Amino acid sequence: MSGLAAGRGHGAVGRPAGRVDSHGQVTGRAVYADDLMLPRTVIAKLLRSPHAHARIIGIDTAAAAALPGVQAVLVGTDLPVKYGILPVSQDENALAIDKVRYVGEPVAAVAAVDPETADAALALIEVEYERLPDVTSIEAALDPTQPLIHGDDEGAGIGANVDREASLEFGDVDEGFALADHIQEDTFFFQGNTHAALEPHATVASLGDDGRLTVWSSTQVPHYLHRILAKVLEIPAGQIRVIATAVGGGFGGKTDIFSHEIVAARLALTTGRPVKITLTREDVFYAHRGRHPVLMWVRTGFTADGRITAMSFRSYLDGGAYGSYGAASLLYTGQLQTTTYSIPRYRFQGVRVFTNKPPCGPKRGHGTPQPRFAIEVHLDKAAAALGIDPVTLRRRNLVKPFSHTVNHLRVTSCGLAECLDAVVAASSFADKHTLLPAGRGIGLAVGAYLSGAGFPIYFNDMPQSEVMLKVDRGGGVTVFSMAADCGQGSTTMLATVVAEVLGLEPADLAVVTADTDLTPIDLGSYSSRVTFMAGNAALEAAQRLLEEILEAVAAELGVDPDLLSAEDGSIIVDDNPDKGVTWAEAVQLAMARSGALVTSGSYKTPQGLAGRYRGAGVGPTPAYSYTACVAEVTCDPDTGFVTVDQVWMAHDIGKALNPLLSIGQIEGSVHMALGEVLMEEQAFLRNGLHRGPSLLEYKIPTILEMPPVQSIIIETEDPEGPFGAKEVGQGALLPVIPAVVNAVHDALGIRVDEIPLRPDTVVTALADLAKGGSGRVGPTSLPDHEFPPLFRVEPPADSPGAAS
Amino acid sequence: MRVNGEPQELLVRPHRTLLEVLREDLGLTGTKHGCELGECGACTVLIDGKPQLSCLTLPAQVVGREVTTIEGVADGGTLHALQESFGALNAAQCGYCTPGMIVTAAALLEREPDPSLDQIRHALGGNMCRCTGYLKILEAVQLAAAQRVTAP
């Protein structure tokens, strides 16, 4: 780079502004997958299993295929290639073969001229099942007398009903407990919940006039869909074009590859007609891939003055029927505890089991909200036991900026202390905690999250993100990126970064996204990676473009390019503002000089982010975001109803590239977290049926439940982030849940160690308290399971464990 | 029926919903579906100016009536104050609930040009949003109301 590094400042970065793509959203012009209406489209539908666990003895599709208007019928053996989002979990077929493993698992598919004919055809498919006992709990899955869900299937799990296990120790944990004056031990359960994006998944597939297959899908990960389509359909990736349409909400729910996407593509090839498949709301609940139910046990040693001497954490994940992202989810429940607190010795043991339920996967915060709930409530209990207030206890243990954790995670910028101070001050926490009238309470918690996973999900040395810029003769700039905007604002982020460098307005740029034919790689909108990674790639591409343009202008004006700046749609000479040229003139000078104006930039994560142990690849990131949250509640002791009166959230996001959108991510995170803590349950009957697969029964907060939120942005300007930015959008979910639970304790004296904290839970806990009990509701035992021997890892030299 | 001011004469199968007819027969795909069971509010349209769920409405029920969808909210190329304020305040993130939110709020502003926060909350109580946490939506409705009150 010449002297054109970031930070010269032209006003796009840091300015609150609406989205650059809001026009389509407010007018109804934005095209979501189900809005695509191609001529001659046929409608596809999936036949789903009514059983949680059964052998498929036979499928008779003859009557369905013979029904007039039916174009094609597919069964599992038509798509025999197994796949899975993670290379270690290649355990799914698009349509079940031989066995079904959860209620709702797709078994067959039809394509027909209209939805009515497709439904009639599904009703004509005869599937003969032989029922098997249903395994629907963690305890049952770990019981060796229960049937095997996968058995010895290649690509599925590591044996019995165990998908994955971890057993790691960093430093000498037993020694740490021996040094402790107080040992706190607790057990928690976090019920599963789901994304409930407003848009049900949909996919359209069609052969283009070049004979290639085009697949439009509501997906956060067009690149991974592209890879898996090529694998399962057994055709070269170059023959497939994947386009992510406007995505009507993701939250991780559209980061896996789904049966309907593969089926639509296969049917388009079979029928030679465009095929559309749109899930119903009930289908979406069964497609799931959301938050794992997790049972957790945590033991922490403290000195009398509240310093952590050691922590041991165990997690048991109910994974559902397939691997999905579960190998990563498991490790995420153990890895990030050390990123907020200075833990000198740490042990993590975890197991993810298969059960006959819809597969779990990533949802906002991927595997970290569950342990965050556990340790933040656990810390509050320890604070009470030690006679230290919860703020002080946390302050004594905060992780240090620019250090390593005991489990080899690299921490760079860290505004956790500032976040904590900000919410404590804004909420007048010290004046309220333990001091509010009965029935009212206040609670606190903190959190940390990744600015993108440090490693891609399949190993490779290529960049995680690339951005291309193309300039038009009129001066128009088009940004090309595969990042799919699922509402988080990545399209606006790209325009803002490029506009900042070029001295243009974000709204004047065109942004082409998420099309494998047109856009260079971005791995996808997950793990809060796009601002950091695509943002850095966009920054590099824009700097290279500016460099070319300034050289051309410098040659024309006969000045040194270092004296030129791009500002407000012009290239100006720093010491002689009258001598500049307009942006469009500058572009034409550069084209006359060197031809096409196309640049690219890319981003690779730095080396050395991870330790050297199995599992070290999950948890590292180029930068952690930090949060602190305070929630104030009013509880009705008669009904058990909890009302959240106000939430204060401070979020260290490095730098707010667009504060309006950043606050939108914080407020949305608070909304989703309040649903998780108070009402949402992806829960199943013992036969594997969902307890309430509709938006009436599965409660999400409406506008009437949403409290005011005071969002406080903390800017630590991360040295590696684009303009100093880190993630926003997932981290803010984490501390809300324990903050509410801690507030309910403050209000009522009860201890609810399981999520969701429903009114009946509160009433049960209060009744126990009234009878002289502890007022605790939560799990009381752990499954009988022997973890593998601990793998011991030496802590890094600059970690809190170095001296241990 | 009339849709966004234009007369429409349609022959449709009796079981099809107004939502399906709007989207599939008339190409008005701005109206969204989130559940097709009357749970989420994404499919809200105005029937004679009142917010109604198009997924629970049969075309036979709207014979001779005026249906307004998100495509009919703007005045030609000029956006409605709500469309402007939703865009300016980031009250739409993924945008999927936005058409239903905007038509519902538009009906509120016709009925109550200067609504209180509680009136806005109650008017939008049946429209789910999973992205925004609703706070920017509240602000956007207030901003649009203020602009319409002060507009000449």
Image (cartoon, coloured by chain):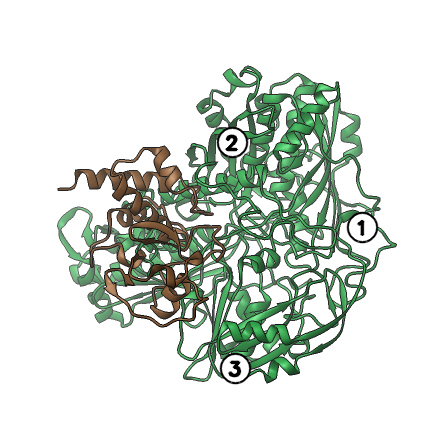
Chain colours: A green, B brown
Determine the chain carrying the residue at label 1: A
Mark 3 vs 1, N-terminal side: 3
Element under disc 2: strand
Q: Is residue A178 visible?
A: yes
Q: Nearer the viewer, residue B140 or A772?
A: A772
Q: Which residue is mark 2?
A: A629
Q: CA distance from mark 3 to mark 1?
A: 45 Å
Residue type marked 3: Gly
How crowded is the residue under tag 3: few (<14 C-alpha within 10 Å), some, or many (20+)? some
Q: Nearer the viewer, residue A323 or A531?
A: A323
Q: Is residue A342 visible?
A: no
Report whether A797 appears left or right of A700. Answer: right
Element under disc 1: helix
Q: Which residue is mark 1?
A: A140
Element under disc 3: loop
Determine the chain carrying the residue at label 3: A
Residue type marked 1: Ala
Image coordinates of residue A238 in percent, x first then y, are 50, 78
Identify the residue shown where x is 57% and y is 57%: A282
A738 above or below A71?
above
Quarter in which the C terminus of chain A is drawn: top right
Q: Which residue is mark 3?
A: A69
Query: To which quarter of the image does residue A555 belong?
Result: bottom left
- Nearer the camera: disc 2 or disc 1: 1
Query: To which quarter of the image does residue A771 belong?
Result: top right
